[in-house]
Image (spheres, rainbow, N blue to C red):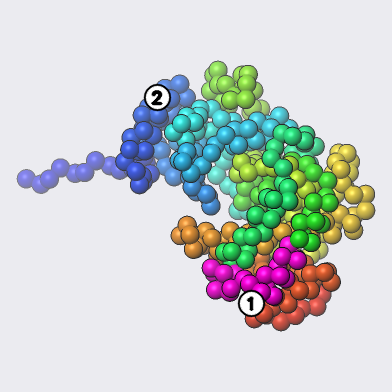
C-alpha cells in the first residue's frame, strides 16, 4: 500500500522564521485579528524585505490584500513609522494606513499600496519618456514639504550629518577598502566633512523623507504609468487610525504614487529629497534629465511658497552639496550592509556612488582634496567636465 500523498503546501508555509517563539506569537496575533479584517491566513506569503531588520508579508482578504510588517521590537522601533504615516496622510500623500499594531511584539497590519515600484516601470534608456512619472513624484514631494512645521520631527542637525558622514571612513574606507584613516587622510576628510556640513546646514529646513527614490514609490495598481489612474482597496468597516479618529475612506480610484519607507524622516535641508530622487541609489541619469526634473521641482516649490532660493543656480549648487553628503553616507551604509549584515547585493551599486562623489568633487575647487583622495584609493584618473553618466 502506497503512502498517502503529502498535503499541498500552503502559501503561509513559504514564510520562514528563525525564532519558533516569535513564529508562535505571530500566529496568535494573526488569528486574533483575522476575522475583524477578513484575512485569509493561508494566503500569507513574502512581499519584500529592506535594508533594515524589517520584512513585509502579503495576505489576502475577501476584497484585495493587506501588508503585514514584521519588525522585531528589540531591533526596530515602529513608533516613527506610525507618526510619519500620520503626518504624510495629513499632507495628502498616499501612504499605508496602520490598521492594527501590536507595539510590544512589532507586528503591524497595513494597507497594500500595490506590487510595482516606480523603478520597475521607469525606462532607463529613454529619459524624456519618464518626465511625467518623475513629475508625479515631485508633486508628492512638494506636498510633503509644504506641510512642514518645526519641532515635529527630529532635526537633521550637525551631529546627525556628522554621524552619517563617518560611515564612509569607518565602513567604506577602513573595512571595505582596508585603508587606515589616519594622518593626512584623516585631516583631509575632517576638513572636507566640516565644509560639507556647513554648506548643507545653510539650506532652509523642511520635512525630509530621507530616502525619496523610485524604489520607495509605488505605482497605482492596474494602470499604465502614463495614465495616472488606479484602483485602491477600501478600508475595513470601522477601521481606526492610530493617530486618532476614524480612518478616512480612500477614494475608489487612486491616482497618486504611493510613498513607503518614510520612518527615518527628519526636519532638515530642503535640498535633500530632490537630490535623493535624481541621484538614485540604483539608477543613474544623464545631466540633461537631472536638470530638467530639478528645474521643474524648483518651479513648483517656488509656486507653493516653500523656502527655496529664487536663484536656480544657487539652489542647484545646494542640491549638489547635499547629494555629496548622501553619497558618502550611502557608500558607507552599503559596505556595512555587506560586511556586517550579510547583504552583498548592495555593495554592487557602490561604484555609482563613487562616480557621483567624483562628479561633484570635480566641480568645486574646495573639494579638490576629496577628489585626489578618491583617485588615490580607487585608482581612477582625474576627470574634467561633469556628468551623471551611467556606471
Q: Residue at point 57% right, 34% down?
A: 79
Q: Which residues are magenta?
A: 173-193
Is residue 191 among what the camera can see?
Answer: yes
Is 174 magenta? The answer is yes
Q: What number is the disc on residue 32?
A: 2
100 left or right, relative to 41: right
Q: Position of residue 86 (x, y in %)?
A: 65, 30
Q: Main secondary structure of the magenta part?
A: helix
* Residue 182 position (above or below residue 78): below
x and y percentages locating residue 366 in the rendered image: 82, 69
Q: Is residue 17 shown left or right of residue 316?
A: left
Report which residue position mark 1 lands on. 378
The quadrant of the rendering that contains the C terminus is bottom right
In the rendered image, which quarter is residue 348 located in?
bottom right
Q: In percent of the image, x 93 and y 53: which residue is there?
A: 311
How would you rate the neighbour count of disc 1 (Cα within 10 Å): few for under 14, some for 14-19, many for 20 or more?
Answer: few
* One can see residue 349 in this view: no
Amino acid at each position: 500500500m502506497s503512502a498517502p500523498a503529502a498535503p499541498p503546501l500552503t502559501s503561509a508555509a513559504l514564510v520562514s522564521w528563525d525564532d519558533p517563539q516569535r513564529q508562535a506569537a505571530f500566529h496568535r496575533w494573526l488569528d486574533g485579528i483575522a476575522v475583524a479584517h477578513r484575512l485569509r491566513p493561508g494566503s500569507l506569503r513574502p512581499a519584500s524585505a529592506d535594508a533594515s531588520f524589517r520584512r513585509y508579508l502579503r495576505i489576502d482578504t475577501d476584497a484585495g490584500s493587506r501588508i503585514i510588517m514584521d519588525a522585531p521590537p528589540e531591533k526596530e522601533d515602529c513608533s516613527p513609522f506610525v507618526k510619519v504615516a500620520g503626518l504624510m496622510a495629513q499632507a495628502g500623500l498616499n501612504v499605508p494606513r496602520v490598521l492594527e499594531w501590536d507595539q510590544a511584539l512589532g507586528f503591524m497590519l497595513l494597507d497594500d499600496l500595490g506590487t510595482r515600484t516606480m523603478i520597475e516601470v521607469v525606462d532607463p534608456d529613454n529619459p524624456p519618456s519618464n518626465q511625467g512619472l518623475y513629475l508625479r513624484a515631485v508633486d508628492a514631494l512638494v506636498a510633503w514639504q509644504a506641510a512642514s512645521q518645526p519641532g515635529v520631527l527630529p532635526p537633521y542637525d550637525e551631529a546627525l550629518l556628522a554621524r552619517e558622514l563617518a560611515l564612509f571612513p569607518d565602513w567604506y574606507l577602513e573595512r571595505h577598502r582596508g585603508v587606515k584613516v589616519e594622518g593626512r587622510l584623516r585631516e583631509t576628510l575632517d576638513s572636507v566633512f566640516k565644509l560639507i556640513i556647513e554648506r548643507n546646514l545653510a539650506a532652509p529646513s523642511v520635512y525630509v523623507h530621507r530616502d525619496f527614490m523610485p524604489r520607495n514609490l509605488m505605482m497605482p495598481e492596474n494602470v499604465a504609468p502614463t495614465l495616472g489612474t488606479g484602483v485602491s482597496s477600501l478600508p475595513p468597516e470601522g477601521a481606526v487610525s492610530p493617530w486618532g479618529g476614524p480612518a478616512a475612506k480612500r477614494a475608489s480610484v487612486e491616482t497618486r504614487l504611493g510613498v513607503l519607507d518614510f520612518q527615518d524622516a527628519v526636519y532638515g535641508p530642503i535640498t535633500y529629497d530632490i537630490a535623493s530622487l535624481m541621484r538614485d541609489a540604483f539608477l543613474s541619469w544623464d545631466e540633461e534629465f537631472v536638470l530638467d526634473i530639478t528645474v521643474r521641482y524648483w518651479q513648483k516649490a517656488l509656486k507653493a511658497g516653500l523656502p527655496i532660493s529664487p536663484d536656480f543656480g544657487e539652489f542647484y549648487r545646494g542640491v549638489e552639496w547635499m547629494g555629496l553628503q548622501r553619497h558618502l553616507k550611502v557608500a558607507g551604509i552599503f559596505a556595512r550592509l555587506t560586511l556586517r549584515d550579510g547583504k552583498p547585493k548592495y555593495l554592487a551599486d557602490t561604484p555609482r556612488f563613487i562616480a557621483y562623489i567624483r562628479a561633484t568633487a570635480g566641480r568645486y575647487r574646495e573639494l579638490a582634496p576629496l577628489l585626489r583622495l578618491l583617485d588615490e584609493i580607487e585608482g581612477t584618473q582625474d576627470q574634467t567636465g561633469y556628468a551623471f553618466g551611467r556606471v
